[in-house]
Amino acid sequence: MCSLSSRFLIVAVICALLGMSAGVGMAIVGADGVVISENQINRNVPSQQADISGGVVVMSSAPFGGNDENGNQVADNTILRNRPKDVIWDGKGTGNTFSENDCRRSTPASICG
């Protein structure tokens, strides 16, 4: 299991994903067993039109020849003022959990609800 954890601001920006532009705080793309916890993920706003953007994005890499995301955890983070949403999950894969995050806007809405 991979863990990304910090009490400090961590910004892992994906600049090029198969030639796509992005404005992402943290992303899980087609990975399994990743934990994103105890981070401040705030104010990630793309400076131009972006194919992928948001505070935390959890998505399948199947459209690029990869896999769905499975068994990932996004927990105990502050994820605020990101565009277009604080958390975005494409709903693919199984066993992905989102809990105890301080966030306002998400897809699906129930993540931050």
Image: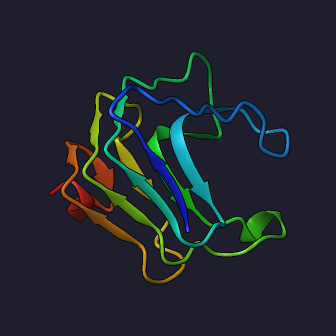
Tell me the residue at 43%/82% (across/down).
Answer: 95
Which of these two is toward me, 20 or 96?
Answer: 96
State the image coordinates of residue 17 (x, y, percent, origin top left).
77, 43
Specify the quadrant of the image occupied by residue 74: bottom left
Quadrant of the image containing the C terminus: bottom left
In the displayed structure image, the side of residue 102 where residue 24 appears, left or right: right
Tell me the residue at 77%/39% (across/down).
Answer: 20
The outermost residue toward the bottom is: 94
The outermost residue toward the top is: 47
Which of these two is toward me, 103 or 4?
Answer: 4
Across the whole image, how many numbered discs are drawn on residues?
0
Specify the quadrant of the image occupied by residue 19: top right
Task: Identify whether 69 is placed above or below 82.
Answer: below
Specify the quadrant of the image occupied by residue 16: top right
Tell me the residue at 21%/64% (across/down).
Answer: 110
In the displayed structure image, the side of residue 9 where residue 19 appears, left or right: right
Task: Identify whether 15 is placed above or below 102.
Answer: above
